[in-house]
Structure formats: structure tokens, C-alpha cells
Image (cartoon, rainbow, N blue to C red):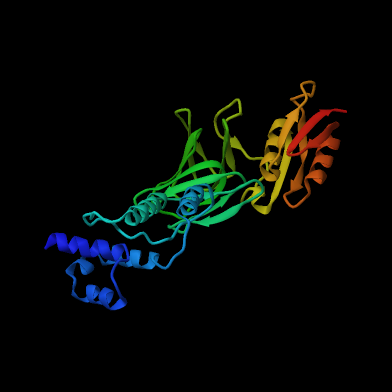
Amino acid sequence: MEENKSNNIEKFLNFELASEEEKEAFKKTSDAYSEYKEIIELFDTVKSVDYDEDRVLQKLDAARLKPFVNKKQVIPLYKKWLPISIAASILLFVTVSLFNITNNVEFQTLAGESVQIALPDTSKVWLNAKSEVTYSKKWKKSRAIDLEGEAYFEVAKGKTFTVNTSQGVVTVLGTKFNVKQRDTFFEVHCYEGTVSVIYKGQETILKANSFFNSKALDKKMQKATNINDKPHWIGKTSIFENILIDDVISDMSIQYDITFIMDNNLNKDLKYTGSYHYDDTLETVLDVFCQSLGVVYVKKGKSIYLNKK
């Protein structure tokens, strides 16, 4: 009896039932159809779909590298498995892959891009260019985000909210703050409330209008000279006040997707004061920047060579 039930399911999934009448009779009279209805109906849908298996799998893999919130419903495959056709194995692989992808929610931005994200607890995140945030779909258990790059947060009051980076950890309850982590650089700016910053095992408490900077000689709280309600980059503007040239070109790089190469004879201690808007052309930004510092540039593809005049 069990063998006959398996054979009927296998025939159905291989599309070997002789007619629509036979298929409908199988649905109405077979206990096996009811037991495995979700899986069987999924395969019934696949029959009419013309798809390239390799292309589908490539797209699934590529989806990991793009900004997305995958809301595709995943059919649970917790029933015992049957000795079915190779087509069933392929679809099972795709379904399980989708399940694994959607365990976490991930957002990524490319050069020059920014995005605003609403979290499950109504907290808001603004993600700057060339940045990435990831959090678990089990958000109620732990309000925690992994960040690479830069993001501004407006956190709804509630349980502890944690931002993890490769350089340090930021913990708050309900506040507004900006976190920037690029390579080994780590900076946290508190705009409202209180923020706990852990850097190399040491904790620093930030109050409103103060910040932590990993490059500062004193790794304690620094008082902000200019008081703003949120970072300038959210308004698509970068503003520099007596900032080292290396930090300025790093900022330009993520907005325009370019690489700077500085001549060895160029003074690396040069500091820049100025600003640019992200809608400005690269040439306009470079002309103003170089004129202010008394340097020249040569553009070759996506590389910018800086030299003395």
C-alpha cells in the first residue's frame, strides 16, 4: 500500500498521469495527495514554466550581493522525503537555498547610493554609499545589526539596540546616532540620547552632540563643534573643516566609485576645508578640491592621480 502511494506521487511529479481526468481523480481519492499537497502543487505549477535551471541558480547566488528584502514565501519541507524524480531534487535545492537566504535581511549600497530603511520596531536607518547592514528576521529576540560602512540610526525606544562593526560595538536604548567604519577607521557621533561605544575592550559613553573617533589621540568623548540634528551626508553633502587629504579623498571615492593614487612627493599632511554635493560632477569636485590645495590631477579611467603643481 505504501509502495503504491509512493508510485502514484512519483508519477504525478514526473507528469506521467495519462490525462486531466486521471490527475483530478488522483487528487480526490488519494490520501497521499492531501498529505503532500503543498509539495505536489508546487511541482504541478513547475510543469508549465519554461526555465533555465543554471540561470535560476546563478540569480539566487547573485541575490546575496544586492540590496533586498526577500519576502518570497518559502514552503516548509518538513515531511518525510520520497524517492522522487531528479526534477524534485532540483526544486528542493532551490527552495532550501531560498530559505537559507532569507534567514537574514540584508541591504547593500553601491558607490554614490544611499537608502533609508525601516526596521521591524519602527527604528529608521539611513545607509550611506558602499555600505551594508544585516539583521536577523528574528528581530524581536534581539535588536542587533551588523554594519560595514556608514549608517545613521534613529532608534525607537525599547530593548537594547546594538550595532556591531569589525572595529567596535555601539549599544543604545533609544537615540539618534551615526556610525562610520571604513577599514580600520571607526567613528560614532551621538545626536540625541546616550550611546555606549566599546572600542578595543574600552567603553566610552557619549552624550548628545559628542562623538568618538578612533584616530583621536584621546580615545574618550569628543565635543562636537558644530551642532546638527543629523549628519550632512543624509542631505547628499560632505563638509570638511581642516580635514586630512586622505580622509577627504576616501569620502570622494565612495561617492564617485573612483580610486586615488597620490604621488610620493605630495604632502600627506595637507588639510582641506570645503564641501561638495553628491549631484556635482566629479570634474567639478576635483577642480575645486585641487585648486584649494595647490595640486593637479590626471584622470585615467576610474583612477585619479594627484601630483604637485
Residue extending farthest bottom? 21
Q: Is residue 307 left or right of residue 205?
A: right
For the residue pair 51 and 159, the one nearer the viewer reads as 51
- Point out residue 154 in the picture as x, y percentages from the top left corner: 52, 53
On the question of residue 278 being in view, the answer is yes
Q: Is residue 124 above or below residue 144?
A: below
Figure check: 169 above or below 47: above
> Of all residues shown, which one is farthest toward the top?
265
> Residue 167's x, y, as percent?
51, 33
Q: Please tell me whether residue 168 is drawn above or below residue 33 in the rendered image.
A: above
Q: Residue at x 44, y 54 (%)?
A: 157
Q: Nearer the viewer, residue 175 or 281?
A: 281
Q: Within the image, what quadrant is residue 304 found in?
A: top right
Residue nearer the viewer, 229 or 21 = 21
> Which residue reaches farthest right?
309
Please tell me which residue is depicted at 20% across the width and 60% down the height of the picture: 6
Q: Quadrant of the N terminus?
A: bottom left
Place of residue 20 in the rendered image (x, y in percent of width and height, measured from the top left):
31, 76
Residue at far left of view: 1
Is 245 situated left or right of 152 in this image?
A: right
The reply to whether residue 197 is visible in this rendering is no
> How many discs appear?
0
Left or right, 41 with respect to 292, comes to left
Task: Return the residue nearer the eye: 277 or 21.
Answer: 21
Quadrant of the frame with the C terminus:
top right
Instruction: Residue 153 in the image: state x and y as whole percent.
Output: 53, 50
